[in-house]
Image (cartoon, rainbow, N blue to C red):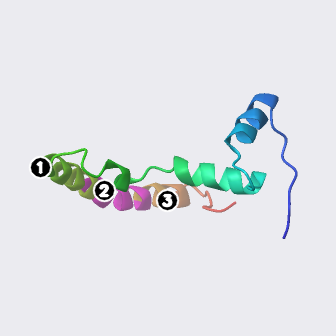
Amino acid sequence: MASRTVSLERSAYERVRLAKREGESFTDTINRLLTESRPSFSRLAGVLSRPDAASVQEHLRRMRSLELPAERLRFATLRRAGHRRNP
C-alpha cells in the first residue's frame, strides 16, 4: 500500500483525531468523513412532499439536459482559441 505524508494545521489534526473511532486508522477516519460529507438525496427521504419532490426532480432533469450542450460549447470555444483540455 502506497502512502503519502500530509501536513495539517493543528486544528485540522485535532478535528480528525476527535472524529477517529476506536480501532479506526486516520485513513479510515478521513475516508469515512469524506464519504459522509457527500450530499445524498436518500437522507432527504420523507422531508419533501411528493409534489415538491417531483418538482425538484423535474428541475434537476432540466438542469442536466442543459449542462452537456453548455460543456460542449465551452470546449469547442477553447479548441478554436487553441487551448487544450488536458495541458
Region of the chain picked out in magenta, as a range: 62-72
Residue at which label 2 appears? 66
Q: Amino acid at mark 3?
A: Phe
Quick check: is 13 in the magenta stretch? Answer: no
Q: Is residue 24 left or right of residue 38?
A: right
Reading the chain from its start, which is encountered first: label 2 or label 3? 2
Residue with the most extreme top position: 11
Crowding at mark 1 (Cα within 10 Å: few <14, some 14-19, many 20+)? few
In the figure, 26 relative to 12: above or below?
Answer: below
Relative image position of residue 84 (x, y in whole percent): 62, 61
For the C terminus, the quadrant is bottom right
- Label 3 vs label 1, nearer the camera: 1
Question: Which residue position holds label 1?
Answer: 51
Where is residue 83? Give x, y as percent. Answer: 61, 57
The residue carrying mark 3 is 75
Q: CA distance from mark 2 to mark 3?
A: 15 Å
**Crowding near the residue tagged with mark 2, few <14, some 14–19, many ≥20 C-alpha atoms within 10 Å:** few
Q: Secondary structure at mark 2?
A: helix
Which element is circle 1 on? helix
